[in-house]
């Protein structure tokens, strides 16, 4: 048996075992909030004119920003095959440094705190 077949067989067996285990292991105790179609905490049948917490949207925007960081850095391992890999790693380091400074700024300003 060649290496590709062994790898495929191990992957298939592992995926099957994990799928079966995840079917039997969770203890489902749903409550009203878990069964609600909205995950943001709003009442779906209430008034749409109620005030909402802007903190929820700020944290969501921060999550999207740092999720975008991962998307920008995913092609980085292939950057060493370019004509100037040092320039690629320089720009990747610049992106990481900028986002790290932004995270530190948000942390110091209290933008990551849920409660005041």
Image (cartoon, rainbow, N blue to C red):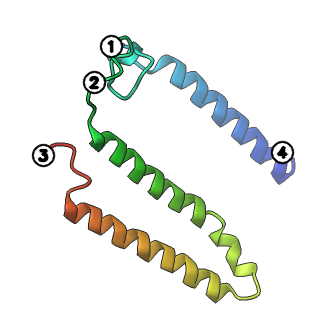
Q: Earlier in the sequence, mark 4 or mark 2?
A: 4
Taking the image as drawn, is residue 31 in sight?
A: no
27 lies left or right of 108: right
The local crowd at label 4, few if under 14, some if 14 to 19, many if 20 or more residues have their Cα within 10 Å, is few
Count of marks overlaid on the render: 4
Q: CA distance from mark 3 to mark 1?
A: 26 Å
What is the x, y in percent for residue 113? 21, 49
Q: CA distance from mark 4 to mark 3?
A: 56 Å
Q: Nearer the viewer, residue 103 or 52?
A: 52
Q: Is residue 25 above or below residue 71?
A: above
What is the x, y in percent for residue 21? 53, 24
What is the x, y in percent for residue 2? 86, 51
Q: Which mark is residue 5?
A: 4
* Residue under pointer 1: 46
Q: Which mark is residue 116?
A: 3
For the residues carrying marks 1 and 4, which lies nearer the camera in this image? Answer: 1
Q: Earlier in the sequence, mark 3 or mark 2?
A: 2
- Residue drawn where x is 37% and y is 18% of the image: 34
Q: CA distance from mark 1 to mark 2?
A: 8 Å
What is the x, y in percent for residue 33? 33, 17
Q: Is residue 73 above or below residue 32?
A: below
- Residue drawn where x is 21% and y is 62% of the image: 109
Q: Earlier in the sequence, mark 4 or mark 3?
A: 4
The local crowd at label 2, few if under 14, some if 14 to 19, many if 20 or more residues have their Cα within 10 Å, is few
Asked whether the residues under the numbered discs 1 and 2 touch, taking CB atoms below 8 Å apart as contact, a structural biologist would say yes
Q: Quadrant of residue 101?
A: bottom left
Q: CA distance from mark 3 to mark 2?
A: 21 Å
């Amino acid at each position: 048996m060649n290496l590709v077949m062994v790898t495929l067989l191990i992957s298939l067996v592992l995926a099957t075992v994990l799928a079966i285990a995840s079917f039997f292991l969770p203890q489902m105790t749903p409550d009203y909030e878990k069964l609600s179609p909205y995950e943001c905490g709003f009442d779906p049948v209430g008034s749409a004119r109620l005030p909402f917490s802007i903190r929820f949207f700020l944290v969501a925007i921060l999550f999207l920003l740092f999720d975008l960081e991962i998307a920008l850095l995913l092609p980085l391992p292939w950057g060493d095959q370019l004509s100037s890999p040092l320039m690629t790693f320089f720009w990747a380091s610049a992106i990481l440094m900028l986002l790290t400074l932004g995270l530190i700024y948000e942390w110091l300003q209290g933008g990551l705190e849920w409660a005041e």
